[in-house]
Image (cartoon, grey):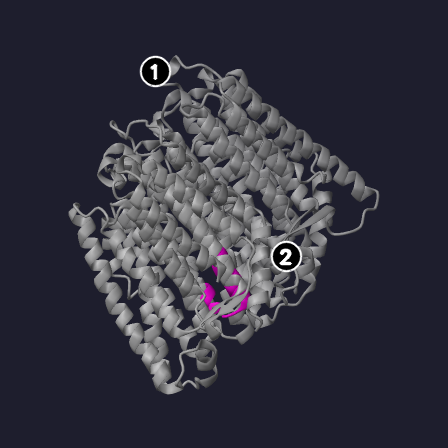
Amino acid sequence: MQQEVTLALIILLMLVADLFVKESNSKILRVLAYVLLVVQIAVNIVPAETSAFEGMYHSTQMASVVKTILSLGTLLVFMQADKWLGREDTSFKTGEFYILTLSTLLGMFFMVSAGHFLLFYIGLELASIPMACLVAFDKFRHHSAEAGVKYILNAMFSSGIMLYGISMVYGTCGTLYFADAAAALTGTPLQVLAMVFFFAGLGFKISLVPFHMWTPDTYQGAPTTVTAYLSVISKGAAAFALMSILMKVFGIMVEDWTLLLGIVIVLTITVGNLFAILQKDLKRFMAYSSISQAGYIMLAVMADSGQGVASLVYYVVIYIVANLAVFGVISSIEQHSGGKVERDDYNGLYKTNPRLTFVMTLALFSLAGIPPFAGFFSKFFVFASAFHTGFALEQTGYWVVVFIALVNTIISLYYYLLIVKAMYITPNDNPIPTFKSGVMERAGLSICLAGVVFIGLLSCVYQYLTDTALLSWVS
Amino acid sequence: MNILSLFVLIPLLMLLGLWIARSLNQVKGVMVAGSSALLVMAVYLTISYISLRSGGAEGEMLFVAEVPWFEPLNIKYSVGVDGISVAMLLLSAIIVFTGTFASWKLKPLTKEYFMWFTLLSTGVFGFFISTDLFTMFMFYEVALIPMYLLIGVWGSGKKEYSAMKLTLMLMGGSAFLLIGILGIYYGSGATTMNVVELAQQHIPEWMQNIFFPLVFIGFGVLGALFPFHTWSPDGHASAPTAVSMLHAGVLMKLGGYGCFRVAMYLMPEGLSMWGDFFLVLTTISVVYGAFSAIVQTDLKYINAYSSVSHCGLVLFALLMMTKVSSTGAILQMLSHGLMTALFFALIGMIYGRTHTRDIRQLNGLMRIMPFLSVGYVIAGLANLGLPGLSGFIAEMTIFTGSFQNPDTFHRVCTIVAATSIVITAVYILRVVGKILYGTCTNKEHLKLTDATWDERLAVICLIFAVAGLGLAPFWVSDMISGSVEPIISHLIH
């Protein structure tokens, strides 16, 4: 419970500070946000298993680790937001940005550590509604407002479907506690329907195909920093929540939901990849790329094992650093070049901004799963966990899904290489001029780069996650 | 510190040195120092390996060492070499060394070029020293991805297309490989990733039948297995000189090595089911590659198709499953690596002067650049298997060994494949006659100069190696056949 309490305190502090800090001094707010978030991470670095409200809130050690990871990711997002928030047209909203972002984070904390459907639902809404405000943050930009509307309508719709599913669980089991519901569920058709509805609701958050329609528009329209936040933190939290509820509550219907997942994974990865090839706008492109990445994350859910849990969290960690590195570069270039986000704008970038190009290249390689960068390891472990379950259950269907996912990595490599090609190979007479990015942006990118290079090579991260997963999920 | 780890450590230090280097001379200094150190290490390793073996050292692998890495999946950083890998390390070191000199005058972005080049070498060396499937696979992919930028940025012709095609096809192969590796690991009981230990485990036959073709094709793509060879001509033709050398000389050998050490060694029952099918494909590779080379007009394309044919011969000989033919296959890898590197180096040097690789526009070069031309003749003769040069030793061993397989089907394949010897002579002699002899009709070409010192150094090193292997093959073939023995005896006949 400590993590939620400290985070709520931080939000309150930021609210109060926002009242007293003058608009011209918004820098103070930014520094305050960094300091408080670092304190939040430092205080809660040791994972603990806690329970409260008679089991409505139940945080496993793994959930605690996930929350720390999400906080770290948010810190990185804040670092990238530095330049954007310092701009004249946004600096007067600095306080709101932090409060809204931290509120969604708090919502996600409740999502991953709920022990009761109601608390879970509240967490989900807390994570969704401020997010819509964030998406529409540049409210005078037409696209941003449009994206906000799309997001909120889709979010409400999927919440409705999910609530319907939850009500079916309540109707058949008479309880909303995870532990009691798990014991009462028997796998009747109505309960399977409940599971499917629930899955659909979260599938929206994770942007799995066919619930992905909002993703490209929202990602493109939202301010780049918010897009980055949406694509990693929000997605990571939802993926972990989906996994824990499927495993904990709907464990009895494991055959149904693995079949469902198998189909959704194949669709998600393939559709995400094929559409990504066609995109010219990099933010839209990253939207489709992140759809396909969600499919890979779901492979670990399909594994339904401790190994899968560890692989999922590991994947999320690496996905956070790699994707944030890419978005960091995109946002940096957007801020310094007057809003250039087309792939063609990146032609010849290597000549003028070799360092940014280098970061971008390594991050893209990591996303594509090329060793020795971290993405390779995370993909391997995700594949291994799904493959292992297929082997243990003697069901070759798992292998087929893994195989299709593997073939899809080649398609993804193609479009990631298109960007590398634009930056290094395609000639351009007027490349984006050389610029020097701010201290915080550079610090954020350096952390991401270090993550992309070292998280994979240092086995201790995976080892730690496996140990924690085995503690939390004794199956 | 284990001596083998130095083969990865030195390139990594070179990368660091290149990163720090500020001037062109510093970059070149780092490259020369590093690649010479690698060459010295490789020679030292070969000598100490042979002396250890003659001193009666037991064990399939020598110089073994391992460090646990990802323990939940039993992944270790484990290294070890047998005669095959020692031969391959020596080959790689020679080609990295000569490749450095072959790209001596490369511009622009020399520093970046050498960084990717070194990363590629890291992957190659790492692959050959690894005995752990996971690290092996990791290094394999590390060796592939730099190719994209090396060809895309510094290549010639339709480089963007070739680079993308090559990268996607090779990475596609590695997708097959990855699932194959998972199959091997879990099928064998998920206790180890070490190749030597895995060979002692038994993978269920039905799983072998599924995963053998996946792994074989996965590595086969890189070994130019028909019909997955199409990346090779385009890739080689567009790549800059040293990259072609390294790619045809060493990278394609990763394919054959992997087929032998991973696919065949670990899944013998899968091999007995699929062996004949792949034998047909490799036979097609051998003959088709040779025929295609005849009709090409671009020097690099000719050599690329010739590589398809010769690398096909490597896989062909491995699938014959006799001790002699497999020894021949490894010798062929070594020999082909050296002579193709020599070929590509010379073609690059000629192209750098004439700015064309079209054989219809080249003639009478012997008078103008005698050194390069003589080198070209030697490379050609080695390629068509003249006794005294390396090609003869390898092909002779292969065909003798192949004919030892008493099965009629295998013998028919051998006879078909043996026709490639004649076809090879046709395309080599055609080119030699066309571009080197006769009178030079192009006035521009008369002003050209012969090789400079850095080019001479690279060419002489390679000629020395080709001739050395041809004149004194016994030390290598003994070393190889001793290591082929345990693998072949593991297979089912």
User: Which chain is disc 1 placed on?
Assistant: B
Residue lying at 59% horizontally and 36% vertically, measured from the top left: B92
Q: Residues within 10 Å of mark 2 (few under 14, many from 20)?
A: few
Return the x and y of residue A357 as percentages of the image width and height: 38, 35
Q: Is residue B322 left or right of residue A366?
A: right
Whether residue A310 is in magenta: the answer is yes
Say above or below: B142 vs A109. Answer: above
Residue B491 seen in the current view: yes
Is there CB contact under 8 Å for labels 2 and 1? no
Q: Which residues are magenta?
A: A300-315
Q: Nearer the viewer, mark 2 or mark 1?
A: 2
Q: Is residue B270 visible?
A: no
Q: Quadrant of residue B191?
A: bottom right
Label 1: which residue? B444
- Residue A422 magenta-drawn? no
Image quarter (top left, top right, bottom left or bottom right) of the C terminus of chain A: bottom right
The earlier-in-sequence mark between 2 and 1 is 2
Q: Position of residue A284 (x, y in %)?
A: 27, 50
Q: Is residue B37 above or below residue B233?
A: above
Against A110, residue A77 (above or below) is above
Residue A290 - label? none
Disc 1 residue type (three-letter)? Glu
Q: Report crowding for label 1: few under 14, some 14 to 19, many 20 or more residues within 10 A (C-alpha).
A: few
Marks 2 and 1, how far apart at CA: 64 Å
Rendered location of residue B414, percent (x, y)? 56, 54
Residue B71: which disc?
Answer: 2
In the image, residue B60 above or below residue A471? above
Which residue is more in the foreground, B41 or A217?
A217
**Which residue appears at 39% of the width and 39% of the height?**
A31
Choose top left, top right, bottom left or bottom right for residue A164.
Answer: bottom left
